[in-house]
Amino acid sequence: MEFSIKEKSRINDLDILETDIIDYTEHSLIDNKILCKQLEYDETLTINNINLILEYYKIPKGRLTKHQKIFEIILFEENINNIDLVNNRKILWDCIRTIYHDKTLKKYLLINVE
């Protein structure tokens, strides 16, 4: 009967550990970003504004709660394929805010995004 002892490579274990830590950190950062956006949207947007955003993105509203709608918006906005549409919406919303604060043009504005 023969026995042999093999030393496990610590370098491979360290590489795997480092990769796991990087993956965890990236996921953690993404989760924090989503959580921050959820809190921001929940605090700053009314249900009417949320519905306007859903309509702009052509996301079906269905029978979702406010929090579910916010989550759908965040998922849409975090998708890299939607970046142009998201940026365009933000620019247009800023334009609407500017008009809303103008005393003369405000009376012609039919929506409020604040």
Image: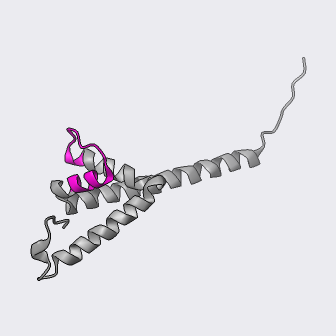
Q: Residue at x 35, y 53 (%)?
A: 74
Give the percent coordinates (x, y) of residue 112: 16, 66
Q: Nearer the viewer, residue 24 or 36?
A: 36
The colour style of the image is one colour
Residue 52 included in the magenta stretch of the image: yes
Q: Which one is in front, 39 or 96?
A: 96
In percent of width and height, residue 72 lies at 32, 47
Q: Is residue 94 above or below residue 56?
A: below
Q: Residue at x 64, y 52 (%)?
A: 18
89 in the magenta segment: no
Q: Quadrant of the N terminus?
A: top right
Q: From which residue to which does the magenta span run?
A: 50-67
Residue 33 sits in quarter:
bottom left
How far across and down, in percent of the image, does residue 46 sit? 16, 58
Give the residue displayed 20% in from the left and 48% down from the top: 66
- Residue furthest to the right: 2
